[in-house]
C-alpha cells in the first residue's frame, strides 16, 4: 500500500501586486498545482516569465481563470499562448472568465501572426457557476468590482477516511484485495465473520478549499463562499487609512480583508493585489494580523503547500 508522504497541492504566488508591475511585484497571477495540473487564477502581463522563474512548468498550465478584464489581470495570456505554441504544445488550454470573456480572448489571440496550433476553449461563467472536474470543482462567486468580475473557489473532493491496516490485520483480514474492498466501503467476510468498513476506515477527510477574490470590494458572497476555506487569497490593495478610497475604486483594504477572513473562519489569509505605492508591506501585514492573526503578504514566487 502506497503511503502519501508528499503533498499533492501547492500555491505559487507568481504575481502579488496590483495595477501595474514594480521591481518588487508583478501583476496578479496565482498558480495552483494540483495532481500534475496547473491552474492559473488571473494572468497579468509577464506571468510567463514569472512561471519560468518558479518551480512550475508553463507547459503544464491546463486552465486559466480570469477574474475580470482590467489589463493587470489578463494581458499575460497572448504571450503565454505564443510561447506554448513555439514549444509545440498540443494539449488544449481552457480559459474561463466572466461575461465578455469569449470576444475579448478571441480578439486577443487572433492578433499578430501566430495562430496557435493547439485548441483553446473559452468559457463564459455566470456567478455561482459550478464546474466539476475529476478530483475537484471550481465555483464562480459574485464579486463587486466596477466591471463584470468573478471570484473563484477551488474545492478538492472529500477524500476517503484513513485505512487502519493494523486494526484490519487484528480482525483477521488478510492483506490484499479485501483491504481495498473495505476501503471502498464494502463489508467483507473472513472465516464466516462479517467485517464492516466502519471498523477499519476512519471518517471521510474534508478536501481542501482555496478562494481567490480577484479585485473586489468587501462582499457577503465572498464571506459565504470562503466559509472554513483552508486559504483565502484576498484583494488588499490599500491600508486601513485608505479604506474609503479602496471601496470607491472597487477594492479592499488590509484590515477589511482580515475581518472577512475572520468572519469566514478561514485557516489562512494571503493579502495580494498590493498597490505599487507600498515598497514596505509591514504595516499592511500588522494591521491585518490585529484582526486575523494568520495573515501575511506573500512575496512574488512564494510557495505554499497545502
Ligand atoms: Zn487589478
Ligand atoms: Zn480591476
Image (cartoon, grey):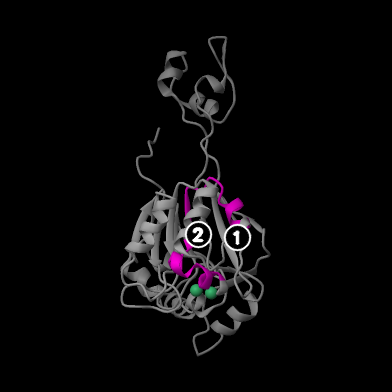
Give the quadrant of residue 1: top left
Q: Earlier in the sequence, mark 2 or mark 1?
A: 1
Residue 276 vs residue 127, the one in the foreground: 276
How far is mark 2 from mark 1, CA to CA? 10 Å
Total marks in image: 2
Counting other residues with Cα less than 10 Å from the Cα at mark 1, is it few (<14), some (14-19), or many (20 or more)?
A: some
Q: Is residue 133 above or below residue 15?
A: above
Q: SS at mark 1?
A: loop
* Dot label at residue 26: none
Q: Residue at x 51, y 24 (%)?
A: 178
| Picture layout, residue 63 above or below residue 157 | below
> Can you give x and y, in whole percent of width and height, for residue 76 in the image?
46, 77
Query: Residue 135: in sight, yes or no?
Result: no
**Within the magenta stretch, is there residue 172?**
no
Dot 2 crowding, Cα within 10 Å, few <14, some 14–19, many 20+:
many
Q: Viewer-proximal residue, 219 or 167? A: 219
**Would you say 238 lies left or right of 104 here?**
left
Q: Is mark 1 within 8 Å of ligand 2?
A: no
Residue at image position (45%, 64%) is 240
Q: Is residue 231 above or below residue 103?
A: above
Choose between 241 and 112: the one closer to the eye.
241
Helix, strand or loop at mark 2: helix
State yes or no: Cβ of the residue under disc 2 lies below 8 Å from any atom of ligand 1.
no
From the viewer's perspective, is 2 left or right of 232?
A: left
- Specify the farthest residue to the bottom: 112
Please indicate, yes or no, whether residue 72 appears anywhere in the rendered image.
yes
What residue range appears in magenta?
A: 221-247
Q: Which residue is mark 2?
A: 256
Residue 38 picture location, percent across and down? 45, 60
Q: Position of residue 303 (x, y in %)?
A: 35, 57
Q: Which residue is mark 1?
A: 219
Amino acid at each position: 500500500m502506497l503511503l502519501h508522504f508528499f503533498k499533492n497541492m501547492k500555491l505559487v504566488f507568481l504575481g502579488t501586486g496590483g495595477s501595474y508591475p514594480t521591481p518588487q511585484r508583478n501583476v496578479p497571477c496565482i498558480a495552483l498545482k494540483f495532481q500534475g495540473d496547473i491552474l492559473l487564477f488571473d494572468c497579468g502581463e509577464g506571468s510567463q516569465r514569472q512561471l519560468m522563474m518558479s518551480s512550475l512548468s508553463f507547459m503544464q498550465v491546463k486552465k486559466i481563470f480570469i477574474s475580470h478584464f482590467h489589463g493587470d489581470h489578463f494581458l499575460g495570456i497572448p504571450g503565454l499562448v505564443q510561447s506554448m505554441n513555439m514549444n509545440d504544445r498540443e494539449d488544449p488550454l481552457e480559459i474561463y472568465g466572466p461575461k465578455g470573456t469569449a470576444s475579448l480572448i478571441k480578439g486577443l489571440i487572433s492578433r499578430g501572426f501566430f495562430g496557435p496550433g493547439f485548441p483553446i476553449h473559452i468559457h463564459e461563467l455566470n456567478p455561482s457557476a459550478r464546474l466539476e472536474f475529476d478530483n475537484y470543482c471550481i465555483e464562480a462567486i459574485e464579486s463587486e468590482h466596477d466591471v463584470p468580475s468573478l471570484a473563484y473557489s477551488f474545492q478538492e473532493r472529500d477524500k476517503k477516511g484513513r485505512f487502519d491496516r493494523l486494526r484490519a490485520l487484528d480482525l483477521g483480514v488478510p492483506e490484499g484485495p479485501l483491504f481495498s474492498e473495505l476501503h471502498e466501503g464494502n463489508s467483507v467476510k473472513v472465516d464466516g465473520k462479517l467485517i464492516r468498513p466502519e471498523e477499519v476506515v476512519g471518517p471521510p477527510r474534508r478536501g481542501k478549499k482555496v478562494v481567490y477574490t480577484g479585485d473586489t470590494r468587501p462582499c457577503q458572497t465572498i464571506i459565504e463562499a470562503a466559509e472554513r476555506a483552508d486559504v483565502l487569497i484576498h484583494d488588499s490593495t490599500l491600508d486601513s487609512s485608505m479604506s474609503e478610497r479602496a471601496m470607491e475604486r472597487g477594492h479592499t483594504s488590509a484590515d477589511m480583508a482580515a475581518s472577512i477572513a475572520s468572519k469566514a473562519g478561514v485557516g489562512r489569509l494571503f493579502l495580494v493585489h498590493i498597490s505599487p505605492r507600498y515598497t514596505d508591506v509591514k504595516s499592511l501585514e500588522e494591521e491585518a494580523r490585529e484582526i486575523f492573526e494568520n495573515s501575511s503578504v506573500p512575496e512574488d514566487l512564494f510557495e505554499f503547500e497545502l
